Structures are given as C-alpha cells and as structure tokens.
Amino acid sequence: MIKKVSLLLLSIISLLLVFDNQQIKAETENIYSQDFVNIEEVKKDFGAYYLYTMGGQAEESEIGVGKTSSNRWYLDNGTVNRQAVDDDIRSNLDTNSIGILTLEKQKYLNFELTVDYKKGSTTDYWPVIAVRQSEVGKYYLEDGMGIFLQKEGFVTIWGTDGVDGPYQSDSIPGYTATANDWHTLKIVLEGLDLKIYVDDLNTVAYQRMLPNTIFKTGYISLVSVNNDSSFRNLKIKELPVEAIDNNDKQEPIEEANSDDALSAIATSVDKIDELKDLHQGNDKTSTVDVNKIIVGITGTLSIMGIILILIILINRKFKERKINIDK
C-alpha cells in the first residue's frame, strides 16, 4: 500500500516539474514578426511619433497606406516607409527631424532581432534601430541606444543610459553605400553582450560589451533620422534572462565620420555606475518575469513538502494499525 501511494505521489511531483519547465520555456521562446501588410495590425502594435530636435516634445503621428498618403509613415507592398511632410527631410536639418515607430506591444531585455532596412536618397542620414528604451516615442540619445550603419559601412552604436559613444566598427567589406539598397541587420543582445550582423547573418560585424546601466527592459523602435528610410520583415525572438557581472568601461571613438555629421553632437563617456547582480524583474510588461518563475518554483517546493508530510503520516498510521493487529 505504502509503495503504491509513494509511486503515485512521485508521479504527481514529476508532472508538476515538467509543467513548470514547459511554461518557462514557452515564455523565453516568444517570437514577434511583422510583415507590414495589415494596417490595423501595425497600428495596434506600433505608435508613430515625430520629434523635430533632441530635447523637444515628440508629437504623435498617423500611419497611412500607399505612397499617396499624407502621413510621415505609410505602408506600401510589405514595407513601412518614412516620407517628407512640409519639407522636413533635407540636408541642412542635419540630425534633426526624427521619425519614430515604437513597438508598444511589449518590452524586451534579451532578444535576437532581424530586419531589412533601406536608406533613402534625400539625405545621407540614417535608418536606426533603437533598443532598451524606457518610454515610447523617445530619441535614442535621450533614452536607450541606437544601432545603425553609416553610408561607408561603419556599424555605429550610440546612446544614453551610460552607453554614450559613438562607437563604430571598421568598414564592412563589400557594403554598398548606394541609396535605396536593401540590407539586413541582425542584433543579438544578451545581458551586456551586443553582437551585430549585417547582410551576412553568420558573421559578427561588430561586438561590444555594454555598461551595467543599460541592463533594463525596454521598447524597440524603428527610427528615421532626417531620411526617407524604409523597413520590412521585422522579426524579434525573446531570449532567456540571466544575471550579469560588472564590466569595464570602454572609450568611444574620438570622432565619428564627419560626412555623416555624427561629430556634430558627439558626447564623451561619463563615469559608469558599477551595479552588481542586476536581474530583470521590476518590469510589469516583460514576458520573462523572474518573480513569476521564483513564485512557481516556491509553489512547487511547497507542494513537495506537503506530499512528504502526507507520506510520513500515512506511514505512521500504517505502523500503528499493524501494531494493533499484532496485539
């Protein structure tokens, strides 16, 4: 009798543990994809914003359909595109006039992102992917950080929250700087380890360790800095979250490429705050919630404890009954 009860209880424990593991695995394999075809889905997932200059107040924008749309952002044949409104894309605006599409559906900490992007021909400025942003509709030099390619093929990282910069890679061999050429960007961000791939998605084009201060959940935005940029085929895979260790600060490049006007607003690296053992878990919108996982494990352990107590009580009762029978 005792053996049968014990086997049954052990089976229940095994099923509970398997169920917990499946839940955690499902959360960490969340994948978002957007083909920019259905305008209602895009409007539901994204917020559109326009910012004239850094430090200003972003205004909400609309997303239209077709090249004849009067909106700054419009969908056309599986792409989302920015166009000039009231002549707000021109070279003498430098790095002002910023269009922002923030994915408001969820925040991300660790992720793998791929997207196709195209720089327009009106100016030499950039399409940008902004990550780990605390607020929607923010410029990446005020919140989070931005990742983009300069026209000569330099992978560039620039931001706030201790990231500073700009930092840039060597020029990517074979990168075509011609306007209206499509390229594919892949970003893999795990903790503080940032890897960037361009076109060749099996070869890292640039890798950098980030400061602890950027270890936070945040929004992802598609950004057009004074350029008629386009994006398509966005895919984001959420990756598991682990604790991080401290890292040493890295100096930025002395001056970025002047043709792209990066040096006009370059900033020096500030002292990085050394924070220890940071975890994700204070963000209510995050898919991978560490607190939920801890609660789940605690609950499982509590159930196991109750089951063990039941086994002991049943065993004791069985012994008492045996003694009574022997008497």
Image: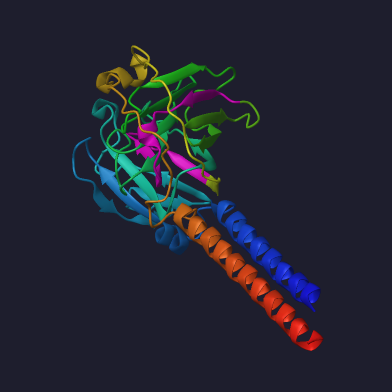
- Residue lying at the far top of the rendered structure: 254
Give the image location of residue 116, x and y in percent: 54, 39
Give the image location of residue 242, x and y in percent: 51, 41
| 14 horizontally vs 49: left or right | right
Quarter that holds the N terminus:
bottom right
Q: Nearer the viewer, residue 154 or 111?
A: 111
Give the image location of residue 139, x and y in percent: 30, 38
Q: Nearer the viewer, residue 280 or 60?
A: 280
Give the image location of residue 292, x and y in percent: 48, 59
Quarter that holds the C terminus:
bottom right
Give above or below for 6 relative to 107. below
- Residue lying at the far front of the rendered structure: 327
Residue 127 image-quadrant placement: top left
Q: Which residues are magenta?
A: 204-232
**Which residue shows up at 67% across the image and 66% down it?**
13
Indicate yes or no whether the magenta region holds residue 37.
no
**Which residue shows up at 39% across the image and 42% down it?**
216
**Which residue shows up at 71% across the image and 75% down it?**
315
| 109 horizontally vs 257: left or right | right
Q: Nearer the viewer, residue 241 or 47?
A: 241
Give above or below for 48 relative to 196. below
| 103 horizontally vs 312: left or right | left
**Which residue shows up at 55% across the image and 59% down it?**
297
| 248 horizontally vs 297: left or right | left
Count of numbered badges drawn on the protein: 0
